[in-house]
Amino acid sequence: MYPMLFDKDKIKIEIFKEFCEIEEDKFISLFKAIFKREFPTEVFRWYELLKGENVWAIAQVRDTGEFVAIYGLMPINIFLKGENISGYLCHNVGVSPSYWATGMFQYIGEKTLKEVLKSRELAIGFSNKLALKGHKRIGWQEIGKMKFYLKERFRKYNESEFRNIYEVDRFEGDIDDLILNLGNREEFLLRKEHNFLNWRISKPFQSYKCFVYRENDLTRGYMIFKFYEDQQSKLKKGHIIDIQAEQDDIFLILLRKAEELATSEETDLLNVWVFEQSDIINLLLEEGFNYDESSYDYSFITYSNDVSITTILGNLDAHKVKLSLGDNDVF
């Protein structure tokens, strides 16, 4: 339960699945009031290009039509212990400052999830500390923390080590077999087939570098990389947005390729986001990465109306939970 310090009869929540249905000016104004930054129209339209049903739930004051809260759900597919589960990434959730600490955050979340999620569907999210309590009040489970690992001193490598790595503009269909193999091996992994990955790297105002590891005409790994100028710290960072590989040795070669990129662009640091107990951490430590104690550890959270799904989530082998920075739509 949660407190409700507003008159719910004066509020209506609408579920939108088409960009053209939403009053854009009101949405953008609310977004700016909540997050203190702009939400470009181009990014809004980018979400619409993703195959599946995007959901934007908006809480409005009935009498005035004022937008006071938003709740975004982006369609995704998930491998959960080998089973393909449909679901959503919860994103861009927020409440107008005039409705802070009133229960509006929980109200729009509860209403939206109950209306949208079907049987055996799953929502996931990456919550900051302030929002976590509100998520939990309506039934979200905290699975664990996401942690940044970084490297600041880079080594030089022989180019021959990267002979099987190719830079690409787009991913081809053969990446789907790799993802399927990984999904059957891991206990939690987003099913990111080539169409999804190509949509992901088309995000407006972002520039990504993409690489595949090919051997004997088979794609056995890939990496998505981005340079980022941190205005707050004044540091140039190299983000490993996503990295997947069939074997540890291939993972390490891709990781070293990222290090080479960081060196060539004279970045101050290279970082990667991983689940706190993932077996990937041992590989990162082996390569000289360290936990970034200055970063905030976001919580990986899940929600489902299906008891069998929540039971599975409560018994995951944390070493086999594979999540990456790119699984969060912000980066």
Image (tube, rainbow, N blue to C red):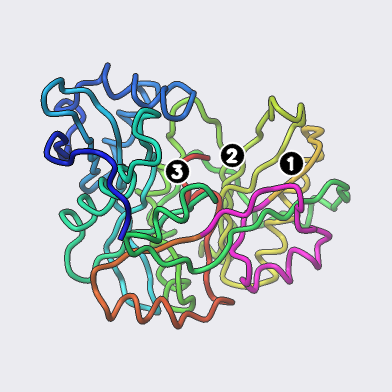
**Callout 1 crowding tier (Cα within 10 Å): few <14, some 14–19, many ≥20:** some
Q: Earlier in the sequence, mark 1 or mark 3?
A: 1
Query: Considering the numbered disc 3 on the image, is that residue within a helix, a strand or a loop?
Result: loop
* Place of residue 64 in the rendered image (x, y in percent of width and height, measured from the top left): 15, 20
The answer to the question of whether label 2 and label 1 lie on touching residues, with beta carbons closer than 8 A, is yes
- Residue 116 appears in the picture as rendered: yes
Badge 2: few (under 14), some or many (20 or more) residues near its Cα, within 10 Å?
some
Would residue 217 be seen by someone viewing this image from the given angle?
Answer: no
Residue at the (67%, 72%) spot, across then down: 248
Residue drawn at x 39%, y 21% as measured from the top left:
40
User: What amino acid is labelled 2 in the image?
Assistant: Lys
Query: Is residue 271 shown in magenta?
Result: no
In screen coordinates, is 270 left or right of 6? right
Residue 286 part of the magenta-drawn span: yes
Secondary structure under the numbered disc 2 in the rendered image: strand
Query: Who is closer to the viewer here, 109 or 102?
Result: 102
Image coordinates for residue 221, horizontal then vertical, percent: 56, 61
| Image coordinates for residue 228, horizontal then vertical, percent | 65, 32
- Which residues are the magenta region? 272-299
Asked if labels 3 and 1 touch by Cβ distance under 8 angstroms, the answer is no
Report the disc number at residue 329. Answer: 3
**Identity, as a three-letter code, of the amino acid under mark 1:** Leu
* Count of numbered circles on the image: 3
Give the vertical position of 219 relative to 180 (above or below): above
Vertical relation: 71 (above or below) 230: below
Q: Please give the residue where the numbered disc 2 appears in the rendered image.
A: 209
Q: Is residue 280 left or right of residue 83?
A: right
Q: Position of residue 265 (x, y in %)?
A: 77, 32
Q: Residue at x 52, y 61 (%)?
A: 323
- The amino acid marked with disc number 3 is Asp
Which-is-in-front pick, marks 3 and 2? 3
Q: Which residue in the structure is indicated by mark 1?
A: 261
